[in-house]
Amino acid sequence: MPHPEHRTVDFFAEDALPVPRITPAEAELLAARELGIAGRAESLGSQQDANFLLRDGDGGIAAVLKIANPAFGAVEVEAQDAAADLIEAAHPELRVATVLRDHDGAPRRAVVEVEGGPVTARVLRHLDGGALSGPRHLSARTVAAMGTIAGKVSTTLRYFRHPGLDRVLQWDLRHADRVVARLAGHVGEPERRAAVLAATDEAWARVESVAAELPLQAVHLDLTDDNLIRRPGSCPPMPDGIIDFGDLTASWAVGELAVQLSSMLHHDGIEPHQVLPAVRAFHAVRPLSAAEAGALWPLVVLRAAVLVVSGRQQAAVDADNAYATAALDREWRIFEQATRLPLAVMTNLVQDATGHVHGPAAAAPPAHQLLRGFGEFTLLDLSTDADTMDGGNWLEAGAEDRAAAAALAGGAAAVRTPYGGVRLSRTPALSAVSPETVSTGVDLWLGRTAAAHAPDAGRVLAAGPGKIELTYGQWVLELAFAATVQPLVAEGAEVGAGEELVHLPACTAVRLALRDADGPAVPPLVRPEYAAGWLPLTADPAPLLGLARIEPVEERSDLLERRGEVFATVQGHYYDAPPRIERGWRHHLLSTDGRSYLDIVNNVTPLGHAHPRVEQAVARQLRRLNTNSRFHYASVVEFTERLAALLPAPLDTVFLVNSGSEAVDLGLRLAIGATGQPDVVALREAYHGWTYASDAVSTSLQDNPNALATRPSWVHTVDSPNPYRGRHRGADAARYAPEAVAEIDGLAAAGRPAGAFVSETFYGNAGGVALPDGYLAEVYAAVRRHGGLAVADEVQAGYGRLGHWFWGFEQQQVVPDIVCVAKAMGNGHPLGAVVTTRAIAERYREQGYFFSSTGGSPVSSVVGLTVLDALRDEDLQGNAVRVGGHLKRRLEALGDRHGIVGAVHGSGLYLGLELVRDRGTLEPATEETAELCDRMLDLGVVVQPTGDHLNILKIKPPLCLDTAAADFFAETLDLALTQLGHAG
């Protein structure tokens, strides 16, 4: 029998491993007498050890007292401390819960007698920040960071040797089959017990087949969400600390990652594919072999099974262990998620993520063609880029059948869909989960009745109304057709090559698929995130039709990299890993994966994306004429007349340009030219454009962090009149206008009267905040009193977006001297305008002439007219009142559930949801807002932050947004805030 100091645990020699029964008072006494550290002890949860937080006299945390289970020998604890020291030395960027040491370097560690026998007690460094445990959703960044830490630990421990590693732990996945067999009886529900045993058998068989190829080494084996500590204040939570080396042992190296992945699966909103960033991150640090990649998900399943049976057993033998009993539901959710998809699917996904590509195999040429006499099959494209999906057809029931029927009517002998292709036709408009859009077989529509023949000798596995399954070499051939059609063969029959199977009717869909005979059943369509897992279990059935196999067209993964190489990087893009958007329809954006995203940010398209009237008007005009406005044609006259008629007198003269930046730039030039006064007063925290003049008056710190310091001398700024977060809040916001007036008067007194005052009429950059009542009236009067002009930036607020007002200045009951318009004017077509008085416009001649090559072109003018027609005919301003008001009420109600919601700003469909960490101090929740936007994208919504603190969701969707979409947005936002831990 080994000396007590050298013994190591053997789980299978123990009846149970209950936590040592030590009270906080006993823990305090032990820490003081044996380890030389005084403090108040607070019990911490643990599966098998006793852990206590030790607080000093001031309430601060002094250390963690860890009392090992009596089954664990001193040599095992020594190994754990040595491994912790090794990792700390190798990776100074990581915080590690190492053993505290005396001045002479000796560890504060002792073997003491407690009820149940001798135990090893020691005090460990406490890491601030808190664990990643709990239900909170884990972002992709957090998941990847976890994987990186696991990779670093694995590489550091690769050559670590110690006698204390020679242990037999229930958590060592080399023993998972035995652990489950021993403890499964503790799972009382027969269905759950059967599921655990079946999953264990399948996973163990997979692991056993490659076990000889799996490297062995020292492993922490518990780098889970419970034992990775977040960097204090990080958001999203980013781990940089490691605690609890209690499961340290020698085992399969890949088990390090498997244990970690399993711990992610219980978090809110996490499903299996969302742990792949950890796999990629681990692989980047410590590459996985093909055998390890093949064993990884089976090991995740085994870990989940061990957690379930061990948790039930621990709760039974240690009923007072609240930590163990509280984990039971969480452990079952881990098991459910680990087994949510077939093992083969997840294994293929892991192999794809690690570069061990295992793509779809090719089917052998048949001895007999499945269908005779059709020659070519016309390919029916149903993807995001397909013309058949135009005009919202992707939302219409029966779109596929209608498209196929049109092709047959056009002379096609037969029509087929591509294998592995994306079908936008299966995409719902609103969904928080990506739809099943990737085809695992092909659909056929035949121009005439035809017989299907067995491609080779085989056995009929299933036959009945509407279906046949037949063996074909290593594959199972599946035929699905109308339920009214009966097969000509019976289940169990042996058929020869060329034997008739069924008579297929004309012009109805027939599904044809090949799946691995040894694999799981494969659905007709799968979600894009899992396609790389499902498709290797299938084959392209094209050879059975006498056609060459078509390789699926894959989206190039380097598209963003290519963009960065040729497209100036200051022209940024939304999201770190953005979906590829190639289509829009109304208030939806559609990715090449066939995902529909609710568009909450696109104020450039007030009518909605791909508006048919705009598309038709542009196409018609392009067939006729597009030139510059020096030529004489009707549309430019009609459009400018319509635009001027929307503005109050004396605003009657229009300049047409291409963008908001140009419009503001021109507006300032008009004001300065007309007044002869070059100084301009602008609001702080505003954005007006990128041209020299419009940028000069832009002071948004997010658009330019040095905005205030780099303004030219002719620009003078006044305080941002924000009644929510500004210097004067609530009723005190009335002080902003007199202060701005004083600044304008001061400039005049100094001999530099302002030639212009420029501002948004509704504060867009601050999230759609209304200016204080009467603000513009007072400021406009002051600047005019000194010979200056009022320039209104209506680029974002104008054109009915506010609902109750067509122009933002109407809310302030003022009339500017110059109005700058863009964005909404062209519904995505580059179009902008400046509207002013005839007298001001004529003064421009003193600076030369004005000309814009495409501003006011025939196409631009026709677009402008069409947008105005649609705004009127579809009552989109009224829709902004109705749907915008409904949405604002829904958003305000979120404040009752989520303390992070500070305020809902705006009017109509020009809204801003401001997020704060504290409603008293209004500390901006900048990082939380960024994380929320990423989570909303996962849930099918495109929304982005705005404001100088980037803590406001800008809510400026197309004005065609309907109530269903508004409700979806509010409900999805509620879900995301809850998943991210902001409820309450």
Image (cartoon, helix red, strand yellow):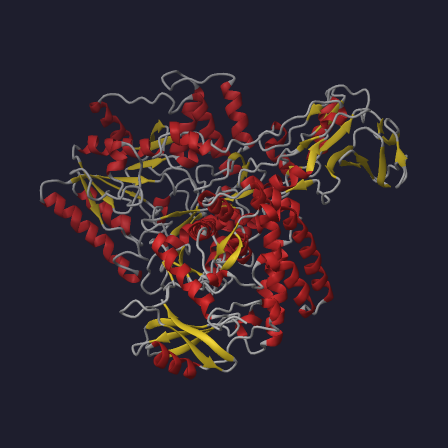
Please state if 873 lies on the left or on the right of 458 as rendered. left
166 is higher (above) or lower (below) than 466: below
Nearest to the observer: residue 460 or residue 206 = 206
Q: Position of residue 248 (x, y in %)?
A: 48, 61
Extreme residue in the front direction:
1
Above or below, comparing residue 555 to residue 190 in the picture: above
Q: Is residue 137 visible?
A: yes
Residue 4 position, x and y percent, is 49, 73
The residue closer to the viewer here, 430 or 778, is 430
Q: Quadrant of residue 300?
A: bottom right
Q: Nearer the viewer, residue 696 or 227?
A: 227
> Residue 794 occupies which quadrant of the picture?
top left
* Residue 659 screen position, x and y as percent: 36, 31
Where is residue 687, by image quadrant? top left
Counting the numbered discs, the total is 0
Q: Is residue 396 visible?
A: no
